[in-house]
Amino acid sequence: MKYQHHVIRHLTLPLCLALSVSSTAWPQSIGNPDVFAVAAMVAEEVELVREVMGRPFDDSPRLPASDVSQQVVYFQAQTLFRKMNQLAQENAGVDRVPAPPLPEGGLTPADTLVVVEGALEQARTVKRALGIDTEAAVFPPTSSSSTGTFMTILDVNRQINLLMREPLRPTDVFGQVTLAAVYAAGILAHSGESDILPAEPPFDGYKRPSDVYGVLLRCAEVLGRIGDLSGAPILRISPRRNIPDDIEPGHVYDIATIVVAGLALVFSALDAEDVFPTLEAPERIFPTQVYARANVLLQQLERIEQVL
């Protein structure tokens, strides 16, 4: 199997039902407090679902992130929409709905609100299917910062990982890391580089999800510096933290999607063009194979930092 992604299509899925998922009347002037309020409502609804399912509470340490832009919040909201849709499909039999695409022009909190309201409707669909739709979630306090909104959405995404019947697998993480490598290849080609896809490093032992998580944190650190060089609003993640041994593929997937979103912003800021490198996918994908691909991405990012 080969990966030949069209990176722009990753951000321009059909709009489909995106404009119909909004269920709440909001004032014309929508800001981060409005988005946070709905994201926190999703968190409360998911907590009710978790209790009836008897699933464990995700108590993962919060991601040490800063400089969260509206674009980063939007991408994390898209991930929430997709995961919530899968949960609704598994428990209520609803059809899959694509996440709304990246709007034309500058992103606003109103754009993110549409996505998060869609996730809220999915959460309530799950509640109805489980027979707990009469239990009301407690209305949460509000936050005015995009960082607070981002953290809330990320926390919900991590919790949903523990609710899905089909949990995220190393294969899912591999796909995100590969997509990030395609973006990076396009940026390198735009910078005049001929070696846009380094060779995978030699095998140095079997790896666990925590090992992949560590490499992707390093990727995020380099990507933050690339954001300064390119003018893209990149999320800052500090890699100076202890990585728990109980890291699961779902945690790694969430970091991988953050890296993909950051590279998409750099790609757009530089007005780079699509490239189609051939990236082979192993027949069986375990954390070891994802680790190798993540190290290719790290080499790409380090080279991008040098040439920008």
Image (cartoon, helix red, strand yellow):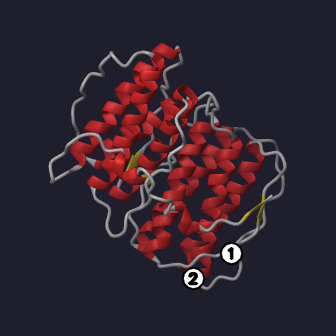
- Residue at the location (50% across, 71% down)? 267
Element marked by disc 1: loop
Of the numbered discs in the image, which one, if any, rests on residue 196? 1
Comparing 192 with 28, the one in front is 28
Q: Is residue 211 left or right of residue 129?
A: right
Which residue corresponds to mark 2? Answer: 191
Taking the image as drawn, is residue 144 in sight? Answer: no
Q: Is residue 190 left or right of residue 230?
A: right
Q: Quadrant of residue 161?
A: top right
Comparing 264 with 38, the one in front is 38
Q: Quadrant of residue 300?
A: bottom right
- Residue 172, above or below 292: above
Residue kind at label 2, given as amino acid type: Ser
Where is residue 105 drawn, in percent x and y?
Answer: 33, 70
- Residue at the location (57% across, 73% down)? 304
- Residue 131, above or below 113: above
